[in-house]
Image: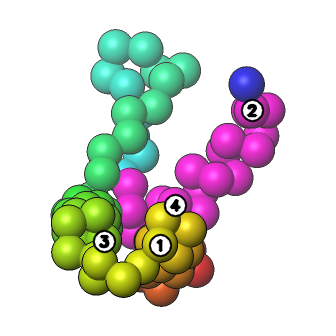
Amino acid sequence: MPDRSDLVKVLDRVERAGWILRTRDTVDRHRHVLVLTDEARAAIDKTERVSRAITDDVPAGLSEPERRTLHRSLLKAFGKPGD
């Protein structure tokens, strides 16, 4: 399990990137509620489309290792929160 302070740093970064909204739980004020933003949902949809394209439409000439490399490269090209 990650250290709490490490998790908070990650959440701070993702929140600054505009991918989540963080609010206090209305029942338990020690807890936070995390909600994906529309921007995050759009990024997830885009990533899923890329993933489907990679697995469904990859040219037949690519080997399995080449497909995995392409998949990783495309995901990297679309970026990560805060990058």
Mark 4 to mark 1: distance in Å?
35 Å
In three-dimensional space, the C-alpha distance between marks 2 and 4, rounded to whole angstroms, equals: 16 Å
Secondary structure mostly taken by the magenta-highlighted segment of the chain: helix
Residue identifier under label 4: 14
The residue identified by callout 1 is: 63
N-terminal label among 3 and 2: 2
Badge 3 crowding class, 10 Å Cα cut-off, few under 14, some 14 to 19, many 20 or more, is some
Foreground mark, 3 or 4?
3
Does residue 46 show up? no
| Left or right of residue 2, residue 30 in this image | left
User: Is any atom of residue 4 visible in this view?
Assistant: yes
Q: Closer to the N terminus: mark 1 or mark 2? A: 2
Most foreground residue, 27 or 72? 72
Question: Reading the chain from its start, which is encountered first: label 4 or label 1?
Answer: 4
Quarter of the figure that contains the N terminus: top right
Q: Mark 3 or mark 4, which has the lower sequence index?
A: 4
Q: Element under label 1?
A: loop
Which marked residue is nearer to the observer: mark 4 or mark 1? 1
Q: Residue 52's x, y, as percent?
A: 22, 64
Q: CA distance from mark 1 to mark 2?
A: 36 Å
Residue at mark 3: 54
14 in magenta: yes
Magenta-colored span: 2-20
Of the pair 63 and 18, the residue shown nearer to us = 63
Q: Secondary structure at mark 3?
A: helix
Residue at x 77% of width, y 40% of height: 5
Residue situated furthest front in the rendering = 61
State the CA–CA distance, disc 3 to disc 1. 12 Å
Tell me the tag on residue 2. 2
| Label 3 vs 1, first from the N-terminus | 3
* Residue 64 locus on image (x, y percent): 48, 65
> Within 10 angstroms of label 4, few (less than 14), some, or many (20 or more) residues?
some
